């Protein structure tokens, strides 16, 4: 049976993108089809959101581009606007309506790319090949759809007045949200303890030396101990090294931290290095007694080395 082309399809590759799709659907009271990348945490997040009542209709996992689902919909909810695969699919299929979801702090960079304030490329990445060649075609399509009032950005990140105005000049709408639906759901896997230390992908991404990262962990442990929740991209070797730090207990809930803590009434201190999670958690936990503390790693490392 052919699907209704008016049913939006959410093309998501990370848990945060998927949460954004669930929030968008709930904000409008409309179901969306879900095309999720086949990774362990994306699949677990889809199951958890569905159990909490997310308005997901048809769901399918994929590697690469979900051509069939995209071809059958006039409205795409896109998790990663910088993706080379998105560029190719958009240039070929030319969707009628586009909604861009959050991909962490890159949501702001993507907004700047749309307005021409920065290049249409992922921050810090060197692009080549087909992704680079189709970029101008995709950007032309996005701006054409924006001029027709068919582009929006659904975000938990503050875009600011000037950026929002620049997007508005193109015809693109900005809709900010604060995880209202997720915040009203119940935590499925409560964390032990009252102090939580969030893991970071900075070591994996080459932004912080491994030993400096462990020095930060040791400094935080000496300040009162913590439950450590690894980042989904951390290596098993690094997690094992963190687990060996005295007064650190590793917990791996298998879900994004926003879902783990949403609806949990336990007052907590959540400590994180600079990351998008500092923003998203403050919104998710806004009605709770939790405190989100964003550390500068350098200060803690210096303290640890004292």
Image (cartoon, rainbow, N blue to C red):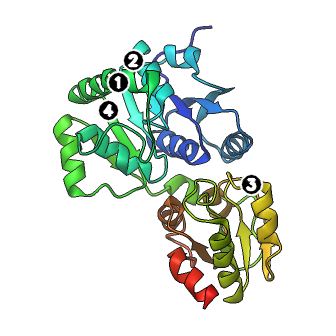
Q: Is residue 258 at least partly visible in the picture?
A: yes
Q: Which residue is mark 2?
A: 91
- Mark 1 and mark 4 lie on one chain; the one further toward the N terminus is 1
Q: Quick check: 215 above or below 95?
A: below
Contact check, label 1 and label 4, Cβ < 8 Å: no
Q: Nearer the viewer, residue 289 or 220?
A: 220
Q: Nearer the viewer, residue 4 or 165?
A: 165
Contact check, label 4 and label 3, Cβ < 8 Å: no
Q: Which residue is mark 4?
A: 151
- Mark 2 and mark 1 lie on one chain; the one further toward the N terminus is 2
In whole angstroms, how far apart are the C-alphas of marks 4 and 2?
A: 15 Å
Q: Dot 4, crowdedness within 10 Å: few (<14), some or many (≥20)?
A: many
Q: Nearer the viewer, residue 29 or 50?
A: 50
Which corner quadrant holds the C terminus?
Answer: bottom right
Question: Please, what secondary structure does the residue beneath circle 4 have?
Answer: strand
In whole angstroms, how far apart are the C-alphas of marks 1 and 4?
A: 13 Å
Question: Please, what secondary structure does the residue beneath circle 1 have?
Answer: helix
> In the displayed structure, does residue 54 sit left or right of residue 161?
right
Q: Dot 3, crowdedness within 10 Å: few (<14), some or many (≥20)?
A: few
Residue sitting farthest toward the top: 1
Q: Nearer the viewer, mark 2 or mark 3?
A: 3
Q: Nearer the viewer, mark 1 or mark 4?
A: 1
Which corner quadrant holds the N terminus?
Answer: top right
In whole angstroms, how far apart are the C-alphas of marks 2 and 3?
A: 36 Å
- Mark 4 and mark 3 lie on one chain; the one further toward the N terminus is 4
- Mark 2 and mark 3 lie on one chain; the one further toward the N terminus is 2
Name the residue rendered at 51%, 71% in the picture.
Answer: 287
Q: Which residue is mark 3?
A: 235
Name the residue rendered at 38%, 38% in the picture.
Answer: 121
Q: Which residue is mark 1?
A: 138
């Amino acid at each position: 049976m052919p699907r209704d082309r008016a049913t939006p399809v959410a093309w998501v590759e990370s848990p945060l993108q998927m949460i954004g799709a669930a929030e968008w659907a709930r904000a409008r009271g409309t179901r969306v089809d879900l095309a999720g990348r086949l990774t362990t945490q994306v699949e677990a997040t889809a199951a958890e959101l569905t159990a909490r009542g997310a308005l997901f209709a048809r769901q399918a996992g994929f590697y690469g581009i979900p051509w069939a689902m995209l071809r059958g919909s006039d409205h795409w909810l896109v998790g990663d606007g910088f993706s080379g695969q998105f560029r190719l699919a958009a240039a070929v299929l030319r969707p009628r309506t586009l909604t861009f979801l959050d991909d962490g702090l890159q949501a702001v960079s993507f907004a700047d790319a749309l307005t021409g304030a920065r290049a249409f490329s992922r921050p810090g990445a060197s692009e080549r090949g087909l992704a680079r060649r189709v970029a101008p075609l995709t950007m032309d399509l996005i701006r054409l759809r924006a001029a027709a009032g068919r582009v929006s950005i659904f975000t938990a990140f503050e875009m600011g007045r000037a950026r929002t105005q620049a997007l508005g000049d193109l015809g693109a709408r900005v809709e900010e949200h604060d995880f209202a639906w997720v915040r009203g759901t119940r935590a499925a896997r409560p964390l032990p303890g009252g102090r939580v230390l969030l893991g970071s992908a900075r070591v994996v991404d080459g932004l912080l030396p491994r030993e400096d990262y462990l020095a930060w962990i040791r400094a935080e442990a000496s300040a009162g101990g913590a439950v450590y929740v690894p980042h989904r991209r951390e290596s098993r070797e690094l997690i094992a090294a963190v687990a060996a730090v005295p007064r650190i207990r590793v917990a791996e809930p298998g879900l994004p931290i926003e879902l783990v803590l949403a609806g949990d009434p336990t007052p907590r201190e959540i400590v994180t290095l600079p990351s998008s999670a500092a923003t998203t958690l403050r919104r998710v936990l806004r009605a709770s007694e939790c405190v989100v503390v964003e550390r500068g790693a350098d200060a803690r490392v210096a303290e640890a080395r004292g």
